Image (cartoon, helix red, strand yellow):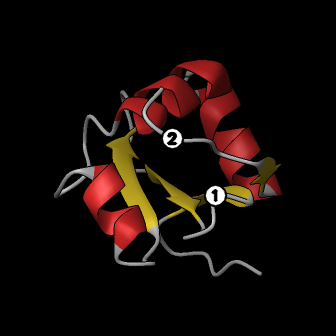
Amino acid sequence: MLFERGNISVTAAAATALRITNTHLLDVLARHGLGDSAPEDPLTVLKRNEQVITAYPLPGSKLVVWVVTEPDSSATFVLLDWEEYR
């Protein structure tokens, strides 16, 4: 894990999508923590005081889960690409 994720919140829609696609939340969070699908290095993003955002297409569906960590690493949100958070 490259950075802390803080408190983790998962929307009901994202939890349902993970369940129906047999995708494990901990796997998605582990990948996010490594920044494996971030457009740039997560540590660089955090140093600029910006959110770390990664996206994961869910297998066998057209759904995409986004994982967003706040700049101070106090909270991470898991949601579908069409949802708003906060």
- For the point 42% across and 34% down, the residue is 2
Q: Where 74 sits versus 4, above or below?
A: below
Which amino acid is tagged 1? Ser
**x, y percentage for residue 15?**
74, 42
Specify the label residue 73 is tagged with: 1
Q: Tell me: residue 48, above or below residue 61.
A: below
Q: Is residue 21 left or right of residue 48?
A: right
* Residue depicted at 61% across the width and 75% down the height: 83
How many angstroms separate mark 1 from mark 2 (CA)?
7 Å
Residue at the (69%, 27%) spot, across then down = 19
Q: Hey, what amino acid is under mark 2?
A: Phe
Residue 12 x, y percent position in the rendering? 82, 54
- Callouts 1 and 2 close, C-beta under 8 Å: yes
Residue occupied by mark 2:
3
Q: Is residue 82 left or right of residue 35?
A: right
Q: Residue at x 37, y 28 (%)?
A: 59
- Say which of 11 and 69 sits in front: 69
* Placement of 30 over or under 62, stated as above or below: above
